[in-house]
Amino acid sequence: MEDTGSPLTRLGQGPAITVGVLATDPLLRAGLAGVLRAHPGFEVVEHEPRQAGVLVAVTDDLRTLPYLVGETSAHTRLVLVADPPRPAELWTAIESGLVVLVPREDASPERLRKAVAAAARGFGHLPPEQLGQVLQGMARLHREVLVPHDLTPTGLSTRETTVLRLLAEGQDTAEIAAEMAYSERTVKNILHKLTTRLGLRNRTHAVSYALRHGLI
């Protein structure tokens, strides 16, 4: 297998990574921007930083993170430099787009550049303690919310997922009804509610949507 090395070893071999920097302290923001700008693989976005490919945010109060980050591009990945967050703060950060958490005490220039490069390549990283909190939270969500309401992590019910999977396999309504032990009317109702909720045109569009978003 080819050794790709650390994310930094690949910088400079293609387009520069666009990075936005946000911090409540202007001097801190300028320092972080300077650290990134010093490497030729990064392009620091001064205007509209929230539209950059990677957004670096630093704050002493994680409760303010959603206001600091604000509206970002759908493709922007958040690198957060902060003290270890409490569970509720961690979930707030994840909702804001967090993919890499750099503990403030470890935020050397090299560590920061590696974090941004990793985020740009689609990688995520959490320290072990925070990763454990996320896994525990996901298990609790599955146990206390999804299972009691017959939902899957995709937001679809188990029977909606089954219907879409069978459609993708080429089965028609009658075949799906027979396999699931439902009436054809029930299968049609499931599809109608699903396509209406997701704003889809028809069953073909529903299958395409599900495949494209990894729902089945």
Image (tube, helix red, strand yellow):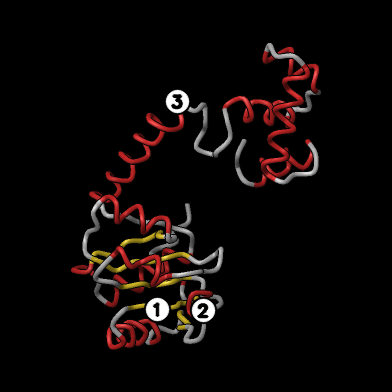
Going by the numbered disc 1, the residue's amino acid type is Val
Going by the numbered disc 2, the residue's amino acid type is Ala
Going by the numbered disc 3, the residue's amino acid type is Pro
94 vs 15, nearest the viewer: 94
Looking at the rendered structure, which numbered label has been put on residue 16? 2
Who comes first in sequence, dot 3 or dot 1?
1
The residue that mark 3 highlights is: 148
139 horizontally vs 15: left or right: left
Location of residue 179 in the rendering, given as x and y in whole percent from the top left corner? 70, 14
Q: From what the image shows, is residue 117 above or below residue 31?
A: above
Mark 2: give few (<14), some (14-19) or many (20+) Cα within 10 Å.
Answer: some
Q: Residue at 29% of width from left, 56% of height from top?
A: 89
Q: Residue at 44% of width from left, 84% of height from top?
A: 40
Q: From what the image shows, is residue 137 above or below residue 186?
A: below
114 horizontally vs 49: left or right: left
Viewport quadrant of the C terminus: top right
Q: CA distance from mark 2 to mark 3?
A: 47 Å
170 vs 148, nearest the viewer: 148
Location of residue 157 in the rendering, given as x and y in whole percent from the top left corner? 57, 30
Mark 1: give few (<14), some (14-19) or many (20+) Cα within 10 Å.
Answer: many
